[in-house]
Amino acid sequence: MTDELSVAKLQAWRSDIDRLDDEILKLLNDRFRYSELIGELKKEQQISIFQPERWKSILEEMMKKGLSMNLNPGFIRNLFIQIHDESVRIQAEIVNKEEKKVS
């Protein structure tokens, strides 16, 4: 393969990765919007933000799916811990936000 072909192939693959990174960010944004909606509902219904059984179930399921895709289990675990932590942070911000009273 010539250097020009290698460079062209590399640029094409990097472009594909950039597109996938954009998709990942969009999916994270969508997911966190649902976290906001869940936070609003939890506040309204006075439901605890952290649901240990739900979290355990999510992590176990994602670990299984990741393994079936031959993804590094440590990476999957860390990724979903980060996503979960951000979801909890978003919900806590909503639940703990004081209602503004109109005078």
Image (cartoon, grey):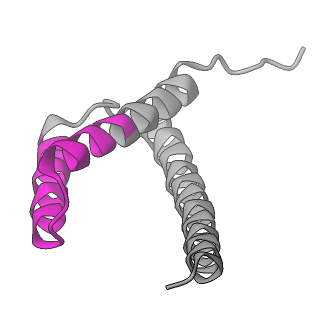
Residue 13 spot, x, y in % from top left: 55, 74
Which residue shows up at 77% across the image and 19% down it? Answer: 100
Give the quarter of the image for residue 46.
Answer: top left
Q: Nearer the viewer, residue 75 or 12?
A: 12
Q: Which residues are magenta?
A: 53-82
Q: Does residue 13 appear left or right of residue 89 in this picture?
A: right
In the displayed orientation, state which residue is furthest to the right: 103
Tell me where residue 97 appears, x and y as whole percent: 61, 20
Q: Looking at the figure, which quarter contains the C terminus?
A: top right
Q: Residue at x 62, y 78 (%)?
A: 12
Instruction: Indicate the quadrant where residue 80 lies.
Output: top left
Q: Nearer the viewer, residue 63 or 46?
A: 63
Which is more toward the observer, 20 or 77? 20
Q: Residue at x 19, y 53 (%)?
A: 58
Give residue 68's position: percent from left, percent from top. Answer: 11, 72
Q: Is residue 94 above or below residue 3?
A: above
Pinpoint residue 85: horizontal percent, then vertical percent: 37, 31
